[in-house]
Image (spheres, grey):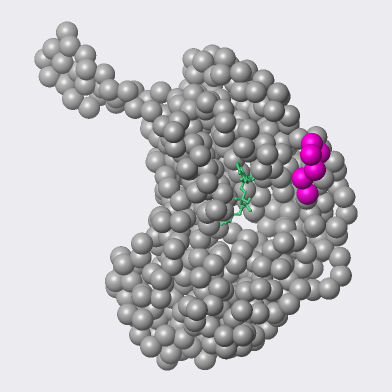
Amino acid sequence: MPTETLTSTLKIFNPATGELLKEIPETSQENIQKKFEQAKTAQKSWASVSLKQRIEAIASFEKLLESNLESLSRTLTSEVGKPIKQSRNEIAGARRRIRFFLEQSEKWLADETVYEEPGLTEKISYEPLGVIVNISAWNYPYLVGVNVIVPALIAGNAVLYKPSEFSTLTGIEIGRLLHEAGIPKEVFHVVIGGKNAGEILLDLPLNGYFFTGSYKTGQYIYERVAPKMVPCQLELGGKDPLYVPADNNDVKAVAAAAADGAFYNNGQSCCAVERIYVHENIYDEFVKHFTEEVKSFRVGKPEDESTYIGALTRSQQLDFLEMQVRDAVEKGAQVLTGGKKIEGDGNYYEPTVLVDVNHSMSVMMEESFGPLIGIQKVKNDEAAISLMQDTAYGLTSSVYCDKKETADKILRQMDSGTVYWNCCDRVSANLPWSGRKNSGIGATLSYHGIRAFVKPKAYHLKG
Ligand code: NAD
């Protein structure tokens, strides 16, 4: 088990070896309260610092991520089991997102005069929310952290940041580097702990709640903070479909791209491909190439440069994956490769491909969040659309085909925050990142993700 919560100490384990890495005291209720009081006072002076200065501090943070890349990547890999190359990629991706906020924030936070006539000016100004909390997930702690922390601080908010209990060491590093970059200690606080610390944060009279994690916890938080009548944004899980219509000349390349979309980060991505539908005309060819690709994935120690599949972060997920495979096989699915835990130290699961699957099976309906995929044959595009939409989630949907018109027709009908043509498992800082239905509410990234951390004030100015 990688991490377990004791009464007041977090034990941090390496999920690839089971080795105890560190024991860290959880932030007590009293200290969380103190952090909140400090943040409340300090937020006002932080908001009065010029926007340019706040942007400069975040620019220094971006540089520190660059100069500390290797040690930060090693820490991340040690506590979540992510292959070292993928840890470096994550930090590089976080730096790209930060640069987007550095370049765009002035434009989207500036006062806007929207109407003028002699004697009347109508203007919108954007004020920070106040003290906000970010309760975060472990699978991409830099990426999902940056989505919230960076625009919130640039906009003049104070932030209480609770990293996941499974990525605590990384959360501490993020706090250390932000302070080193010039963000005042009173303005940005790291709160250490799991569910208990989260509950204490939910009790505080904060001005905004920004959560990344599972649907179950997100829905609970939404209900819990509703009486406060402050913004609450949720970035939750998905069961993201990928469809391969008959209109495809290079099925081998599509199979390789789809396999990467399903298995990168060991499948532990909110926008990982979670289920695949393939037109019957190309189904056999696709399945053959896809399975060959998955068999070629190198499973190994996360710190080895050649590893593509590392350890799963949470040991409980191994049992969940076993349950999904068992359920599918009992209902008629076939395992083409993988299908079980890898014995020995660490949370390893074989990259697994299932066929002859259908929607009575958990693997096609519930988020797997691991190296497991089901591929279902479909008769035509209409059948695929209907299956893609048969889900409680709405994060991303993708289509791989040659003709843009084929993709357009399908993607228009997807009730998901993001749609992809000939790509998948991709996030861009230029575009809003938002889930529909059980995948969440609100958006981060793009100008929507800058404006999410401010409240508009309408000025009616006569004279
Ligand atoms: P989780 O819901 O178990 O935990 C998320 C956070 O909530 C953690 O910090 C945890 O300590 C905290 N928490 C748990 N119970 C709480 C409570 N009662 N009160 C307050 N806080 C509480 O999720 P996870 O396992 O960390 O993350 C995996 C999930 O996150 C997956 O479903 C994944 O798809 C989703 N995710 C979504 C996005 C996105 O952008 N949509 C990004 C990354 C991960």
> Whole-percent x and y of residue 459?
26, 18
Q: Residue furthest top?
A: 463
Residue at 78% over, 50% down: 3
> Whole-percent x and y of residue 131?
53, 25
> Whole-percent x and y of residue 142?
63, 45
Q: Indicate left or right for 381 with 82 as reference.
A: left
> Whole-percent x and y of residue 193?
71, 39
Q: Residue furthest left?
A: 118
Which is more toward the observer, 317 or 58? Answer: 317
Vertical relation: 88 (above or below) 44 = below
Residue at 71% over, 24% down: 31
Vertical relation: 70 (above or below) 368 = above
Which is more toward the observer, 347 or 34? Answer: 34
Q: Indicate left or right for 43 with 139 as reference.
A: left
Image quadrant for the C terminus?
top left
Q: Is residue 99 visible?
A: no
| Res 190 → quadrant | top right
Q: Indicate left or right for 12 with 448 as reference.
A: right
Residue at 12% over, 19% down: 117
Query: Magenta residues, as a range?
Result: 4-9
> Is residue 119 magenta-colored?
no
Q: Is residue 452 visible?
A: yes
The mark total stands at 0
Residue at 69% over, 63% down: 317
Vertical relation: 13 (above or below) 457 = below
Vertical relation: 246 (above or below) 303 = below
Image quadrant for the N terminus?
bottom right
